[in-house]
Amino acid sequence: MKAFITFEGIEGCGKTTQVRMAGEYLRKRRIPVLVSEEPGGAPLGKHIRKLLLNQGDFRMDAKAELLLFAAARAQHVQEVILPALAADRVVLCDRFSDATLAYQGFGRGLSLEFIHSLNEFSAAELRPELTILFDLPVETGLMRAISRIAHIRGAPREDRFEREERAFHQKVRDGYLSLAKNDPGRFRVIDAARDVQAIHQEVCAIIGMVVQY
């Protein structure tokens, strides 16, 4: 029954909504499932998340950013993901190692070869069986993300990446599509500009390829 499935995409693509809906779908079918996220997922990762996603009064170097994501992932994998898989659960994760390649590799321009090695080290060579990529134009994603952030009250805004220039987000999107093109056996690309329920139905059908309902 166990399976490791990741949800990826640019800001505002709707993956967080879809991973939660997919988790509920599996629970209703009495399939043991864990829904998690990166950065976060484990207590240490939640502290690192605050540093990475909230706009602070300090500058963060791209290399420091990369290493913080790797540290959060190492703890997440050891403390949360591997134990869940060992317990024969399906793990749905909102971002994983592909996000690091897309954002810090393609987006920031750091060495893809080094990031691949760092990902393998921090994730203990764990790789998803299936990665669902929610793709849509950068302008649409940013408009959605900024609108969502504007409605947040009484909680951290987590808008550090949304504040990046459009060119950065285009590099990230292009990077994700490049990763999907080079690994078609693992990736499934979804048109994320459509209705939420239509996307959910497609997600459930895709998950059904690796999880027996």
Image: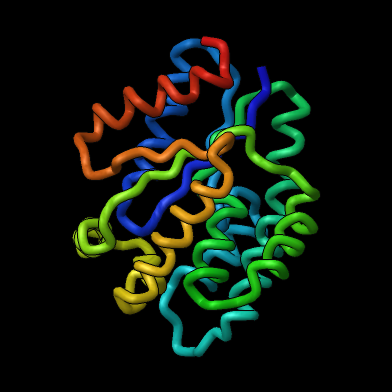
Identify which residue is drawn at 24% across, 28% down: 197
Which quadrant of the figure contains the N terminus? top right
Q: Residue at x 58, y 58 (%)?
A: 46
Q: Is residue 196 left or right of residue 22?
A: left
Give the side of residue 128 with respect to residue 28, left or right: right
Q: Residue at x 53, y 53 (%)?
A: 179
Number of numbered markers: 0
| Residue at x-position 51% and y-position 89% | 59
210 in relation to 174, above or below:
above
Residue 83 locus on image (x, y percent) = 76, 34
Query: Percent from the top left, x then y, of residue 181?
Result: 50, 48
What x and y, as percent, mark residue 135?
34, 48
Judged left or right of residue 72, residue 82 is right
Q: Quadrant of residue 169?
A: bottom left
The extreme bottom residue here reads 58
- The x, y position of residue 66, in whole percent, is 62, 72
Q: How is the image coloured?
A: rainbow
- For the residue pair 28 and 202, the one nearer the viewer reads as 202
Residue 34: which quarter of the image? top right
